Amino acid sequence: MSRLSFEKKRVQQPVAHPAVVQVRVSGAGSASAGGTAVVAAPGEEIQQAVLNHLQRLAISLGAPIRATIHDDRAGCVVPLEVSADGSSRVAGDPVRVAPRGARPVSPVTPGMVQAPTGQFGPPPVMDAPLARTAVPEAADERPAQAAVPEAADARPASAAVPEPAPKPDPAPALTPEPAPLFDPEPAPASSPTPTPARGFDAVAEEVLGDEPVTETAEGAELLTEPMARINEAVRDGRIDAAAELAERTVVEATGVLGPHHAEVLHLRELTAYIAYLAGDPVRSFHLSLDLARLRRQAADAEAAYGNVRSAATAWRAVRDPEEGLRMGRDLIDLWTDLMAEPGPAAEDPQPLESARARMVRLTDRAAKAAQA
């Protein structure tokens, strides 16, 4: 996430952006997206690094991005769509293509798939061979069962015992195709009720909305105009200006409404989101975790869980293992307390398990760094 601030600066001026970003995954730790090199951080898989890059680009532009992921190692092309709020989905079925270096069927644009042309022969016969049928030896080719013996105990000397039918050849074993290196986010399982947007996802939806969202009537009167300017700056990619406006608005609103007013807490959520976009995940993490503690003290379990999810998003962007371990302990302690209380955190245990798994990985990375 440390590169995000530079990407934001590049889009401050109106620039024509392609509707489709071409991505090529060339190895286990390197790829390119739209001509820009993408390198996985230590301990990070290349598909996650590519997805993070596309999410940051979509958020900064405020518009969806369609990406064509060409995985050279697995010989697979995956169409992916990244929404303006950073969420992603597979936009079609993956297509198997020849690995890079093989003779192409016909010339194409790098990263694109062209349908094969020409005549195709008949399909191969896939059925197992049929069992042979014994042929009767009688001259008139009638079945042996139809011949009437001359005597009850008479048996033809030349009668032959028919051969047993041979067993069909076993079907050849199918070798499973290698899984593509780039594995987009799986589609969420169907649920009778949709999961509400939480954390930075909810903040992004507000920023990209038509009108600023306020909590109270006095907040609408006081904050509609400055929040509109903040949201516009974020949508235009002017993250530094948005951060300055947000900080100033928080100070002014705190002086008028008080530090624990709902509008002030709402503004601080926006400030944490902007810090995340600006490439400052540590500040974003601490702002979000402080908000989660305040919301828990106010018995607002839904809002507290949303702030915890925001803190977790910022925490995952911290690459230093020692710092990540310190922050992770504070995060998991508060998260565990929320899990023990009624509310959405207790109903959604999987994200906390993922956070604990990351703590194990950070511990391993910190140990290796200490040995080096």
Image: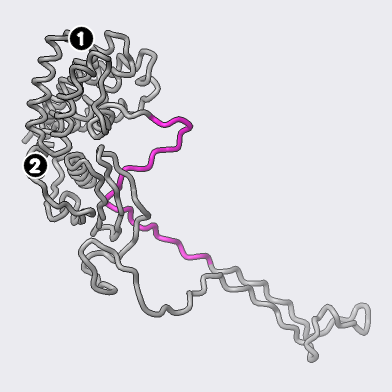
Vertical position of residue 117 compared to residue 14: above or below: below
Q: As rendered, which of 167 and 14 lies closer to the eye?
A: 14
Q: Which residue is mark 1?
A: 260
Label 1, label 2: how many angstroms apart (C-alpha)?
A: 34 Å
Identify the image quadrant of the C terminus.
Answer: top left
Q: Which residues are magenta?
A: 170-195
Horizontal arrangement in the rendering, residue 301 relative to residue 232 (left or right): right
- Residue 304, horizontal then vertical, whole percent: 28, 17
Q: Amino acid at mark 2?
A: Gln
Q: As rendered, which of 124 and 20 lies closer to the eye?
A: 20
Q: Amino acid at mark 1?
A: His
Identify the image quadrant of the N terminus.
Answer: top left
Quarter of the figure with residue 44: top left
Q: Residue at x 30, y 46 (%)?
A: 184
Q: Considering the numbered disc 2 on the image, is that residue within a helix, a strand or a loop?
A: loop
Vertical position of residue 372 compared to residue 144: above or below: above
- Residue 19, horizontal then vertical, whole percent: 23, 53
Q: Which residue is mark 2?
A: 12
Mark on residue 29? none
- Residue 274, horizontal then vertical, whole percent: 15, 29
Instruction: Mark 1 or mark 2: name the one nearer the start of the chain.
Output: 2
